[in-house]
Image: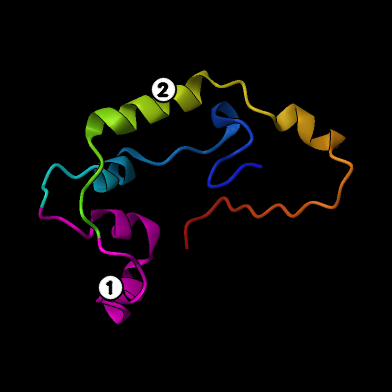
Amino acid sequence: MLYAADCCFKASVQPSPDVIKSVSSEDPGDKMAALRALFPEKWLLENQDPRKYFLKITEVALKESIARQVKTMDDWDGVCDRLPTITQPTLLITADVHP
C-alpha cells in the first residue's frame, strides 16, 4: 500500500519551493502553515477554525526532518514499473493539479 505517496518520487511532480517553505515554517506561532499547503485559500477563508476538522496542532515539522524525508524519497527507486503486475482490484487516486 502506498498512502500519501507516489509510486516513484523521481518521476513525480514535486512541490514548488514556496510550498515546501509554507509547510516548514520556522515561526512556531504559524499553526496554519501546513493547512495553507493542503487546502485552497478560498476553502480556508470559509473554514477558519481548524479545530472543527483537525486535531489540535501542537508542533511544526523541523526543516531537518523534512529534508530527511525528501532525501529518503529521492533515494527510493519506486514501484511504478510494478504497478502493471497488480492482479487484484485496486483503487488508485491521483492528481496532477492542486485545486
Seen in the image, is 42 located left or right of residue 22?
A: right
Q: Nearer the viewer, residue 58 or 74?
A: 58
Is residue 99 one of those drawn in magenta?
Answer: no
Image position, residue 93 (x, y; %): 65, 55
Is residue 33 one of those drawn in magenta?
Answer: yes
Seen in the image, is 30 located left or right of residue 64?
A: left
Look at discs 2 and 1 and give the one toward the viewer. 1
How many numbered badges does the structure rendering display?
2
The residue located at (32%, 77%) in the rendering is 52
Q: Which residue is mark 2?
A: 71
Q: Amino acid at mark 2?
A: Lys
Image position, residue 39 (x, y; %): 38, 64
Q: Which residue is mark 1?
A: 51
Estimate the spatial distance between the alpha carbons at disc 2 and disc 1, rounded to whole Å.
32 Å
Q: Nearer the viewer, residue 98 or 72?
A: 72
Which numbered disc, 2 or 1, marks the residue that appears first in the sequence?
A: 1
Seen in the image, is 14 located left or right of residue 9?
A: left
Seen in the image, is 1 located left or right of residue 12?
A: right
Q: Nearer the viewer, residue 10 or 52?
A: 52
Q: Amino acid at mark 1?
A: Arg
Callout 2: SS = helix
The residue located at (15%, 55%) in the rendering is 30
Image position, residue 2 (x, y; %): 62, 42
Q: How is the image coloured?
A: rainbow
Which quarter of the picture shows residue 78?
top right
Q: Which residues are magenta?
A: 29-56
Task: Work out which quarter of the rendered image holds the N terminus and state it.
Answer: top right
Q: Is residue 75 above or below residue 38?
A: above
Label 2: few (<14), some (14–19) or many (≥20) C-alpha neighbours in 10 Å: few
